Image (cartoon, rainbow, N blue to C red):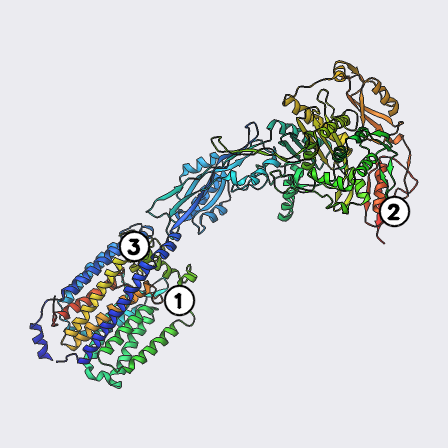
Amino acid sequence: MQTPSKSTKNRLRFVLGGIIFVGLLLAVRLVQLQIFKSEELKKGALEQWTRAIDIKSQRGIIYDRKGKKLAVSVTAYTVWATPAEIKEPKDTAKQIASVLDMDEELVYEKITKNVSTEKIKQWVTKEEATELRKLNIRGVAVVDDNKRYYPYGNFAAYILGFTDIDNNGLYGVEKTYNKYLTGIPGKWVKTTDAANRQLPYDGEKIYDATDGYSIVLTIDETIQHFAEKAAYQAYLENKAKNVSIIVMEPFSGDVLALANKNDYDPNNPREPLDKNVKEEWEKLSQEELQKKWFEMWRNFAINDIYEPGSTFKMVVAAAALEENPDIINSHYYCNGSVRDIKGVVLNCTSKHGSQTFSEAIHNSCNVALVNIGRQLGKEKLLEYIKAFGFGENSGIDLNGEQKGIVPSGPETIKEVNLATMSYGHGIAVTPIQIINSLSTISNGGNLLKPRLVKEIIDSEGNSIKSFESEVRRKVISEQTSKTMLNILRGVVEEGSGKRAYIPGYRVGGKTGTAQKIIDGRYAPGKYIASFAAVAPTDDPKIVVLVVIDEPSGSYYGGTIAGPVIKSVMEDTLNYLEVEPIYDKKDEEEIEKKITVPDVRNKPIGEGGKELADLGLKYITEYQEISADSIIVDQFPLPGVEVIKGSIIDLYLNKRTQIERLMPDLIGKTNEGVVSILDDLGIQYELKGNGKAIRQEPEPGVQINEDVKIFVEFSSQ
Amino acid sequence: MQKSKKSKKSKRGSSDFLLLVSIIALVFIGIVMVFSASWPEAMVEKDDGYFFLRKQLISAIIGSVAMVFFMNFDYRRLKKLSLPIYILSLISGLLIFSPLGSTRKGARRWINLGFTTFMPSDAIKVGSVIFFAAFLANKKDKVRSFKEGVIPALLYMGLSCGLIYLQKDLGTTITLAATMVGMFFISGMKLGLLFVFGAAGALVLYLSSRGEGNEFRANRWTSFLDPFKDKLNTGWQAVQSLYALGSGGLFGLGLGKSRQKFFYIPEAYNDFIFSIIGEELGLIGSLIVLLLFIIVIWRGILIALKTEDLFGCYLASGIVALIAIQSLINIAVVTSSIPTTGITLPFISYGGTSLLFYMSAVGILLNISRYAKLDRS
């Protein structure tokens, strides 16, 4: 018999020992994995089992100061697919595509993606949602979602801003208060298999979302409407690039309205409102389109700077009065220009002759302002400019505010700078800074932080946080404030701001016209007309600023911005139930009806006197007129009954007035040519840089308003 | 020899009880775990959660019949039948390359018999063990001779393993090669040959992970070193297996409650069923299964030790070696202790052919135990 040898048995025992040893090693390995590394591995496993889907929180409401809802979240429906659960993607895609009016292939692509969940379409209509739910397709879910909705459309767009599709604020208070508005999103946690199907255990856990807080603006929806309406009208009438209107309460710094036109609809922020523009945009590349969008979303009132021109004179005047109240008794003589600065001639709008301090402001006399500026001195002037908040952020709760440009220190202010700054040139400001400085002048001298948001409240209306008016500093005294208000009232009643006069409401203000600076140089033919006003001057309730950017045709602040101020002021003061107080003059004017005479075909001097004798005021498109300009048309027409003090628009035919000769421009620099041509008040076109080499028409030719002047420059 | 055979026959006792109970326990655990681990795939692919359970139950019943048959079939008769058995098993292996061969997941490892499929590598494993045991027993001391022992032994090893390697089944190739080397070792081969085998094995492993079509094996080496580095690709299986074991912890998630079987571990009822055991039954469950295998191996080697018959000793050793090597490699793979290689866990993983042949082999082992001088506690 063959029996296993001893060596065989030994080797068998050895093998048994080896196997038991390996078995022990494996046991140790199991202990290591299942006990010591268990937590770590479990974590990794859990991560791959669990899928968390965000549950959106309801975004808070944006209210106006009276509780009107300006931005709300409405229920919308979003269609989601769970690709793993869709059995017949072809048929499913067809069904979904027909209900949602989508491309079948696109739907197919989405529902066959290798992902846990895929969004098929966001924000479908209620009808579509209901229909889709009825079909009850496995793997397709219609989820309640919320969507930002701005019930008034393109209303207060630049205050509200808008959100992206995930409800994050991108512009306006939607952005600056995003953190309060969004709330805390919830989570929907479920465990899934490797193909993203729900696992049969654990169920799902839902952590509810916390809704966002609501915010209450200082904006008054009604006043905002007045501003929007007036801005839109001015935008159309002047074919302007932009019209911006801000209404503020001087004592609290509350922004009651802020409107910019042209604007956009935050419900659809990427589409221009104008159909023609929309068509134009369709041809643009993505890059160009983005540029256009950013341009459209710019809030002119705080994001753009401009040269304020004459509106800035109120700041200089206030500064001068604060430094020396007796200056009010000073007299200033204007002979039409300032010629004592070497190499520069600074022109005035006309030869104003001798004027008091107040009259100089009423006349908006540059020569007088230069002298007032000199009396102040550059250190004091700069000090006040800064004190009034220029060159720094106003602190309004909107993004991208500009600081403007003011000289960094007195040493950088040369003689000519001091002179031009005194009448608002060579300095850049934002509209919000200008209106804020008028607030300061009106409220007794306190520079405030403009307030846009009054309060943050929860969904039950409990206050979470309220914002108080914030005084940044005291700039001028009560007395200076009062004096200034009187002077500004004079501007409207007797000076360049007549068009903003409202009987009974004692409006004060200052007009301004400035040439635009584009790329660091004055852009010919492009102006910014503005008007800052306050009413009533004896107890200021509101301040209003109107800025008309690049108007076509007339560009004088008093002429084109004045009526806008009047419209907004009158509406707002009525709405705020500010009792009109008619003085004797006003009452007489109101009681007495006057029949408008026919002044057509008469020289302006004669016609104007006729109107003045009857107690009517008149206004013409041009400031530089001579007494023999012929009136070609008038409005209202003759025979219409108007109240005393009404303004008659007179249209002059300049052609027949002065025969002007085309000046010789050859060899002059750009700046020289611009200043000469601006004085002529005729449209012109410039080409090139350097010295003028060619001009049309030829020198000496008789020219009139209709002539188009063309000058070509060359640097050689 | 004839004489002794007769005398042994009269001494036939009862089978080794502990071995039998352990095997029944393993097969039972296998059925339960195949059911649990296959449920998700069965529901999704077959729309019938009991699909794999039913097939495994049928296989277990057939396997049990085969086991009982071999428990009572005098193993010594296998010695005479060893050559035909071997040839039959080799032919079945060759059938893979006939039109009957069927390919799954890129590997041609099955024969389609119409009513069922059959995995010839399982037949080759058992057939080779029986034949090799007979060969070694016949050679007796001549196994040490180079010409009469080593050359033919190498030839048979090459034949058996080569046929399996052709099926791109490296795991089984290693199992069988190691088993046969083990048998050769026990039969008294020269120790120096171990180095030769070691070197040859290393060479085969190296060559098998080189060249076109074998990149997957090279990846397994790199992903073994740090499976988490590329856990979505080459490291996927190893990482998923570790996640399963780790999330099981000490007590497990509870029977049927594995998450990893939901397609994180591909074919969880197959090669990686041990990690599902670890996940559902915890360290306690996985150690019990490991312990059962150790008991089976211990009892098997004990049977080999106590068998007076050389063929019985070699046959028992071979069967134990098969079980030991395959189960330990599988557990080592699942615990990421060695690089991934596709190999099932005997008695537990899903698969009819495997269960049938392993249970038959255990039947033979139990039959041998009836002639061994065992202390049947």
Q: Residue furthest right?
A: A700
Q: Is residue A589 left or right of residue B47?
A: right
Which chain hosts label 1? B
Asked if disc 3 and disc 2 are in contact, CB closer than 8 Å, the reply is: no
Residue type highlighted by circle 3: Ser
User: The N terminus of chain A appears in which quarter of the rendering?
Assistant: bottom left
Mark 3 falls on what kind of element? helix
Which chain hosts label 3? B
Mark in front: 3 vs 2: 2
Q: CA distance from mark 1 to mark 2?
A: 83 Å
Q: CA distance from mark 1 to mark 3?
A: 29 Å
* Residue with the mark numbered 3: B38
Within-10-Å neighbours for mark 2: few <14, some 14–19, many 20+: some
Q: Is residue B324 left or right of residue A295?
A: left
* Residue with the mark numbered 1: B225
Q: Is residue B291 left or right of residue A46?
A: left
Which residue occupies the foreground of this view, A101 or B174?
A: B174
Q: CA distance from mark 3 to mark 2?
A: 95 Å
In the image, are marks 1 and 2 on the same chain?
Answer: no
